[in-house]
Image: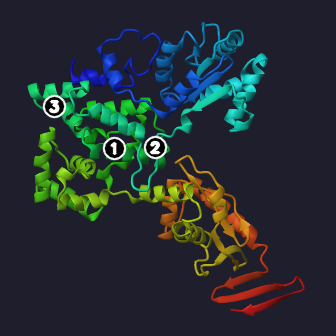
Amino acid sequence: MNLAHALSILSKSSPYAVSTEREQNQDLLADYKSHVYITTDIEVDFKQELLSSHSNDIIFLCGSSGDGKSEILTQYSQKHKATHEFHLDATHSFNPNQTAINALDERFSQFKGNEKPLVVGINIGMLGNYAEEGAEKHDDIKVSIKAFLENKTDDIPTNHIFLDFEQYPKFTLGHEVSTSDFAAKFLARLTESTLDNPFYALYDSEVQKLGHSKLTANYALLGLESVQKNIISLLLKARLIKDQFLTARALLDFVYQILAGDDYLFDNLFSGSDNELLEHIQSFDPSNIHTRKVDEFVLQFGLGIEDDGFTKLKDQVKAQGVFDVLTAASYLRMVYLLKDEEQFANGYINELKADFDNSLVEQYANIWLLHSEFSGKQKKELNKFYKDTLIAAVHRYCNRNSPSLDKDQFFISEYNGFKTAAELEVKPDFSSIKTQEVSKIGSFNAHIRVDDHSLLPMPISINLLELLDKINQGYRPNKHDKNAVLLLDEVIEQIITVANEKNTLFILKNDKRYKIVNEDDEYFEVSGL
């Protein structure tokens, strides 16, 4: 047994990637897999529901492929098969001539004919299919499934329990640190520097006997807490910016790829290997950043000029097994990964680090939290986002063809060279913000009032937030911003609807301005501005 063989259990191509009831042989690799197993919140709730279930209960464990359903179900089916019925994978059937829908029909019929609770592992897509195509005799179950899918919790019978992985987010946003509890625990368990950790024992033995290889160097780098935090930050960016969900199977394969790839960890991390997480993280490659300091480093590296701080870092990382780094791009990635490691800190590294900091994620997390935790006390902080970012960008976008309008005036239309505008009070709708529920980290709803009218909620993702910032800096959206532009256009359309009800209208042409006031629908008063 060596470290490479032991780590292979993390690969998505490993037979250990998916647990099944057929895994009865407790070989050595199974022990390695057992060591890095993390008990999740959904498993805790599942166990509680399982142990308290009654004979007419159905427990649905729902999610998507690779999220860990089979790990939980295999473990508990072996322990509780005497008292519960289990249907581990609802995409499978009992024989070649049977569909997965037919198999579920059969399983539900068996359940109704015995005295055991039923546990069903099922993908959300399959759940929807069964609600539409299942047998009529199971309409009670189909109606319950539809109520769950439509989030009508009051219509779900008490004996039908739905546990959905999507309701247990892999990431949490915080004021100081945003993280993934699951990923953090897994990386810490995999790399903890104690001989009780079988992976570390293999690593230590190989380094003692053979010296460092790229694999052991990668394992040593991953063992640094700051590196683990920076990797989780990259995964969070992939979730927020690329809308890439984190599943247990994808995470394990991701870790295997960055450890066992051909290059050092920092290069493997941005290689875009055959892993959905790596494919998205590739676009965050720090070697693609162009700032004065970064470009200066690349130029000096090419000329063989080394700053003392850089030379010191090169010597320090040798203790981790990092020796033959050949390109400026690789060194930039290494600095990015090690930028928060205190033992490597120096003035030169800190200057490069400043160019790597990603304030956008922190900005989004803080605004998301202000909406999620809003109680009325955070008006000052939240008003800053609405006034300086959202409303300012909406105003700029609305008036992009008439930039000379004052800050409270909004462009409505143009006829024969004459532009019309209205003066509106646009502000955050704090009462709607207070009553809304914010749960999923992918977006939050912004609420705006125009005069006395509340607009429809506007979903703000991190990508839209970035666009709002760019608009305020003078950027004009184009065809590449299509989805964001649709959202902005919807807001503008609602604002114009309110503007059309105003009694006062401004008309502009060249340097001439006119103000028209509808006096109680009796006459119009016109004045030049």
Position of 526 relative to 170 (above/below): below
Position of 182 relative to 126 (above/below): below
| Cβ–Cβ under 8 Å for marks 1 and 2 | no
Mark 2 or 3: in front is 2
Amino acid at pointer 2 = Phe
Query: What residue is drawn where x is 27% and y is 51%?
Result: 336
Q: x, y percentage for residue 510?
A: 64, 86
Answer left or right for 54 relative to 193.
Answer: right
Answer left or right for 337 relative to 509.
Answer: left
Observer able to see residue 511:
yes
Crowd rating for badge 2 (residues with CA inside 10 Å; few <14, some 14–19, many 20+): many
Answer left or right for 68 relative to 428.
Answer: left
Q: Which mark is residue 171?
A: 2
From this viewpoint, which residue is outermost toward the bottom? Answer: 528
Q: x, y percentage for residue 288?
A: 32, 53
Q: x, y percentage for residue 11?
A: 35, 25
Instruction: Check the picture and name the quadrant holding the C terminus.
Output: bottom right
- Provide the residue designation for mark 3: 213
Q: Which numbered disc, 3 or 1, marks the residue that appears first in the sequence?
A: 3
From this viewpoint, which residue is outermost toward the right? Answer: 522
Instruction: Check the picture and name the quadrant holding the N terminus.
Output: top left
Q: Mark 3: which secondary structure?
A: loop
Residue nearer the viewer, 281 or 318: 318
Q: Mark 1: which secondary structure?
A: helix
- Provide the residue designation for mark 1: 231
Position of 197 relative to 22 (above/below): below
Residue nearer the viewer, 158 or 38: 158
